[in-house]
Amino acid sequence: MSLLMAATRSLLYLFPRTTRSEESVRREMAKRGPEAAPFPRGLHRVAVVTETTVEGQRVVRITPRRGATGAHLIWTCGGAYVYPALRTHWALLARLVRASGVTVTVPLYGLAPEHDVDDAVRLLDAVHDGLRDEGADVVHLGGDSAGGALALAQAMRHRDTGRPAASSVLLVSPWLDATLSDPEVPWLADLDPMLGRGGLVVAGAWWAGDRDRRDPLVSPLFGDLAGLPPVFTYQGDRDLFVADAKELARRLARVDGRGELRVYRGAFHVFVGAPWTREARRATALLAGVLRGRP
């Protein structure tokens, strides 16, 4: 573990955990704006950013200014299904575009409790199908935290509906089980400087809507993992979700799934968003390698 990782994690303990309880989630939601964070200047330096509307939701396209490979990545941002995309999301995607030449499409799905997973499924189906209709042959799926669950659920849905398989699925600190029922979760909650179980369970229930929280579209850990594209997971060990990431790797191995899990010692939730740390830079380089077709 690098000193900068340790120092950053220590600083995070000074901030309140917005997902500690239902009350804390509602309090934070009351302050949220209606839109994702503005694009940082660094994003415009490396890419042309355009927007469309699909199924009533904003969809952002990030196209490299130089070195575009023709590969595409559909990225779903995290935020416990209740918080919009952050500046750190755009900054991470700018680094991936610069390092890999991939064109990124970001569907900004509607947030809970006003929206649920079925709304997101309609949006993601339309975005994926539209991209394929444009002639995109190499399409990766990816996401962080709650967005990671959506990316893996998309891969399952594409398999089950006969859509073309993605080239890979890229998961950063994915939230794979909305029930957070793994017995290690209470112990991990004491180590995680960012996440709290109580608020996440409530947000997961809002997101499930009329579905069971163990439905694979909500909690893809409980779905059929056979026949998926390679799944690459990047995870910190000071993260409430690390037990489920390890369980995903075990379950994929049982069905001869392809891909890998990399766990970074001392790293926190979505640590890839902290590029001043050695761990984040290494993980970003690995993500870019997959997107270039050289995992």
Image (tube, rainbow, N blue to C red):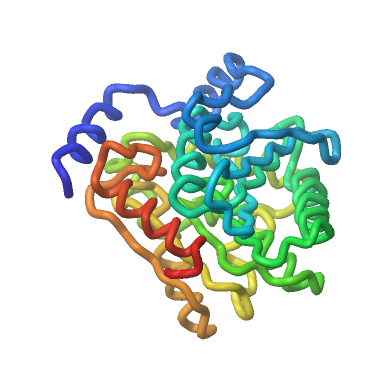
The quadrant in which residue 72 appears is bottom right
Q: Place residue 136 in its image quadrant.
A: bottom right
State the residue in front, 12 or 273. 273
Horizontal side of 22 relative to 72 (left or right) equals left
Name the residue rendered at 37%, 55% in the picture: 285
Q: Residue furthest front?
A: 66
The single residue placed furthest to the left in the displayed view is: 3
Q: Residue at x 29, y 41 (%)?
A: 190
Q: Where residue 276 sits: x, y (%)?
A: 27, 36
Query: Going by the image, does 137 lie left or right of 24?
Result: right
Of 52 and 256, which appears nearest the observer? 52
User: Picture coordinates of residue 164 (x, y %)?
Assistant: 74, 71
Q: Which residue corresponds to the image point at 44% horizontal and 70% vertical from the top-left?
A: 294
Q: Quadrant of the C terminus?
A: bottom left
> In the displayed structure, does residue 242 sit left or right of residue 277?
right
Residue 179: x, y in percent? 55, 51
**Residue placed most toward the observer, 194 or 107:** 107
Q: Can you say whether 37 is above or below 240 in the image?
A: above
Tell how many labels: 0
Query: Residue at image x 51%, y 85%?
Result: 256
Name the residue furthest top.
31
Counting from the top left corner in percent of width and height, residue 31 is at 58, 14
Relative to 126, say whether 233 is above or below.
below
